[in-house]
Image (cartoon, rainbow, N blue to C red):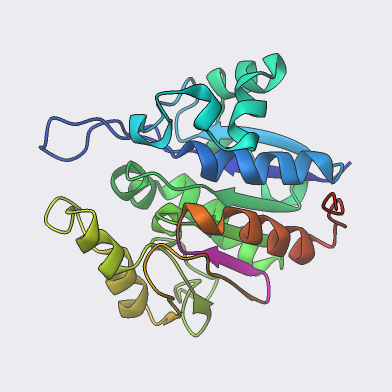
């Protein structure tokens, strides 16, 4: 059974605002079930292991208003146990994985770019032709990753992520440690964005990126394609 590693942020403070952040529920749950339903083994990880914190704004006050994939995840005992007991990213090796996926949530902007272990794993998987994917703020985990020749993994590749316009729209431009679109462009990525808060995802070889939570399903489809795994047909 092919394995895919999902790496979540553990950072919970939204800068100095006094507000909480973390990973984004939809960006975790939608790809998780796409991979699981396609017959893959899904491994959940954080930089140091343990239980990550979700961004409270990624859940609706009424559980019934959450996306179906989120409700399914929260009702699945095994999935919830795995999420509360993630493995440290340093415990994983490229050879054992078919792909790596980085969900967003603003927390990723602080901890993922600072992890040498994550950067090394992403770079090794990229060089090995394994699928590397991220959505929304998840591409923050790509910015420190380098190929064997020292070049950024995003250099010369079509990439996407939460846009500077979207960051401005949510009022967090001055809170972020850097702007994701700007950084990806600075690293040589060929950034492709669509209108704010509309679905957009792009695959360039083994690199798959998406713009926002609404792009999660399409990113998951492109990840499965990059891993050579057939997606489960959608119900009519």
Magenta part of the chain = 205-211
Q: Is residue 66 above or below residue 106?
A: above
Image quarter where the N terminus lies is top right
Please report the residue visible at 67 percent of the width from the left and 27 percent of the height from the top. Answer: 72
Q: Is residue 130 visible?
A: no
Q: Is residue 144 above or below residue 23?
A: below
At 82% across and 41% down in the image, what residue appears?
A: 37
Left or right of 92? Residue 183 is left
Q: Is residue 100 magenta?
A: no
Give the left or right position of residue 102, taking residue 60 as reference.
right
Please tell me whether residue 34 is drawn above or below residue 200 in the rendered image: above
Q: Residue 18: x percent and y percent?
A: 13, 30
Measured as percent of width and height from the top left, residue 13 is found at: 23, 32
Locate residue 190: give its quadrant.
Answer: bottom left
Q: Residue at x 34, y 79 (%)?
A: 185
Q: Residue at x 52, y 80 (%)?
A: 158
Q: In this view of the protein, can residue 17 be seen by the observer?
A: yes
| Count of numbered circles on the image | 0
Which residue is nearer to you in this view: 96 or 169?
A: 169
Examine the rendered structure and indicate whether residue 137 appears above or below residue 13: below
Residue 69 x/y as whole percent? 64, 36
Q: Is residue 209 magenta?
A: yes
Left or right: 176 in relation to 121: left
């Amino acid at each position: 059974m092919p394995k895919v590693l999902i790496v979540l942020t553990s950072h919970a403070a939204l800068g100095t605002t006094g507000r909480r952040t973390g990973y984004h529920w939809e960006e975790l749950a939608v790809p998780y079930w796409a991979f699981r339903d396609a017959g893959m083994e899904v491994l959940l990880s954080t930089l140091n292991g343990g239980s990550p914190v979700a961004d409270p704004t990624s859940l609706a006050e009424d559980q019934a208003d959450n996306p179906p994939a989120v409700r399914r995840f929260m009702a699945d005992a095994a999935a919830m146990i795995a999420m509360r007991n993630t493995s440290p990213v340093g415990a994983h090796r490229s050879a054992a994985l078919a792909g790596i996926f980085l969900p967003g949530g603003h927390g990723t902007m602080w901890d993922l770019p600072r992890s040498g272990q994550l950067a090394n794993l992403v770079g090794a998987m990229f060089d090995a032709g394994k699928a590397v994917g991220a959505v929304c703020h998840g591409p923050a985990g790509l910015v420190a990753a380098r190929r064997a020749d020292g070049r950024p993994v995003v250099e010369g590749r079509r990439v996407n992520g939460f846009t500077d316009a979207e960051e401005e729209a949510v009022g967090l431009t001055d809170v972020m440690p850097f702007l994701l679109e700007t950084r990806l462009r600075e690293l040589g990525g060929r950034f492709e964005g669509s209108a704010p808060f509309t679905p957009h995802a792009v695959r360039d070889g083994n690199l798959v990126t998406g713009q926002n939570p609404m792009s999660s399903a399409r990113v998951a489809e492109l990840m499965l394609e990059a891993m050579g795994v057939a997606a489960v047909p959608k119900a009519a």
